Image (cartoon, helix red, strand yellow):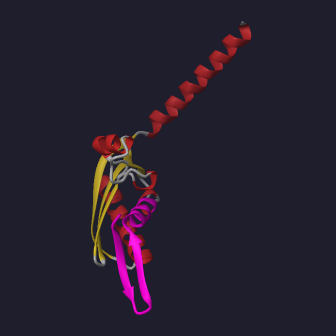
Amino acid sequence: MDNNKIDHSIGSVKIADEVVEVIAGMAASEVEGVAELSGGFAQDIANILGRGKNSSKGSRGIKVEIDEKEASVDLFIAVQYGVSIPDVAQKVQIVVKEAIEGMTGLTVMVINVHIQGIAFKNTTEIKDVKDSKDKTNKEKDLKEK
């Protein structure tokens, strides 16, 4: 585990990479148009096997590198269908940078946003309706027996 160390006259403060990952993830997930954080297929397999650097649930889809007092962030996200991808990506960059700098005192040098997919809201709604119809039909069949 790499730590960011901030020296003060009365001691030091160490910020773990994982803390910055959580801050970035929480900030990004609050941006309208972001459907989810996603590490992609290779990262998902590594996480399942427990071998991924970001195998904890809170940091999935986020890669952070910290040098001295600077941070670089890579975010892997899926956006909602119909949104402006450049606008969402830019908003994610702004919100994540402000959150990390405000909470840690680190200077964020770069935030790369990787769009890994698109989430279709209507597909989920249709699936939910279909599932409820199937459940109703099963309940009806059980009552008839």
Q: Residue at x 37, y 86 (%)?
A: 7
Q: Position of residue 119 (x, y in %)?
A: 40, 42
Nearer to me, 143 or 45: 45
Q: Residue at x 58, y 20 (%)?
A: 134
Residue 6 in magenta stretch: yes
Q: Residue at x 33, y 40 (%)?
A: 45
The part of the chain drawn in magenta is: 1-26
Asked where in the image residue 113 lies, by quadrant, the reply is bottom left
Q: Position of residue 15 (x, y in %)?
A: 40, 72
Q: Residue furthest top?
A: 145
Q: Position of residue 37 (x, y in %)?
A: 39, 51
Assign the C terminus to one quadrant of the image: top right
Q: How many tags in the picture? A: 0
Q: Is residue 48 above or below residue 69?
A: above
Q: Is residue 116 above or below residue 96?
A: above
Nearer to me, 97 or 46: 46
Asked where in the image residue 62 lies, by quadrant, the reply is bottom left
Nearer to me, 16 or 84: 16
Assign the N terminus to one quadrant of the image: bottom left
Left or right, 10 with respect to 39, comes to: right
Residue 16 in magenta stretch: yes
Asked where in the image residue 58 lies, by quadrant, the reply is bottom left
Q: Position of residue 5 (x, y in %)?
A: 35, 78
